[in-house]
Image: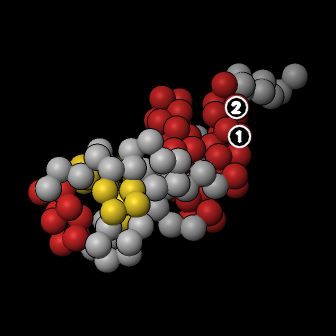
């Protein structure tokens, strides 16, 4: 389970220092019980983990993200991916789907 760090602390189990201003250690990841324990002391704020189109490996994610999604949903997924795992293949696929949606359909027949 992941949690956003809201106050600097040193994890007693890993001895790692977590800080809200740290680039690498501004999100704490641990067991649900450990996150709840630290959250009760005011050091972290549990992040809501929701099932998402972004769950899975790159190929699974590409299969989930199609032009059936709205432009707003695609932008939201792109932002979440950039803030989360930041996988180049996923971001490129989302950008390609967005470009595809923006282009008017080709007229056929003439």
User: What residue is at 12 percent from the left and 57 percent from the top?
Assistant: 40
Residue 101 image offset from top left, x and y in percent? 64, 31
Q: Quadrant of the N terminus?
A: bottom left
The residue that disc 2 covers is 99
Q: Which mark is residue 25?
A: none
Can you say which quadrant of the picture contains the C terminus? top right
- Looking at the image, the residue that sits furthest to the left is 40
Identify the residue under disc 1. Answer: 96
Mark 1 burial class by Cα count in 10 Å: few <14, some 14-19, many 20+:
few
Q: Nearer the viewer, residue 26 or 9?
A: 9
Residue appearing at x 39%, y 56% in the figure:
18
Secondary structure under the numbered disc 1 in the rendered image: helix
Position of residue 8 measured from the top left corner of the image (x, y, whole percent): 33, 50
Q: Are marks 1 and 2 in contact (CB under 8 Å)?
A: yes
Above/below status of 45 relative to 101: below
Query: Dot 2: few (<14), some (14–19), or many (≥20) neighbours within 10 Å?
Result: few
The color scheme shown is secondary structure
Q: Is residue 78 above or below residue 3?
A: above
- Count up the numbered dots: 2
């Amino acid at each position: 389970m992941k949690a956003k760090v809201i106050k600097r602390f040193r994890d007693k189990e890993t001895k790692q220092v977590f800080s809200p201003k740290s680039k690498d250690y501004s999100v704490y990841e641990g067991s649900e019980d450990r996150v709840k324990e630290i959250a009760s002391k005011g050091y972290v704020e549990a992040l809501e983990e929701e099932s998402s189109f972004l769950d899975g490996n790159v190929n699974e994610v590409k299969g989930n993200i199609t032009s059936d999604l709205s432009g707003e949903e695609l932008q939201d997924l792109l932002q979440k991916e950039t803030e989360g795992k930041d996988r180049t293949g996923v971001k490129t696929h989302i950008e390609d789907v967005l470009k595809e949606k923006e282009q008017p359909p080709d007229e056929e027949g003439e």
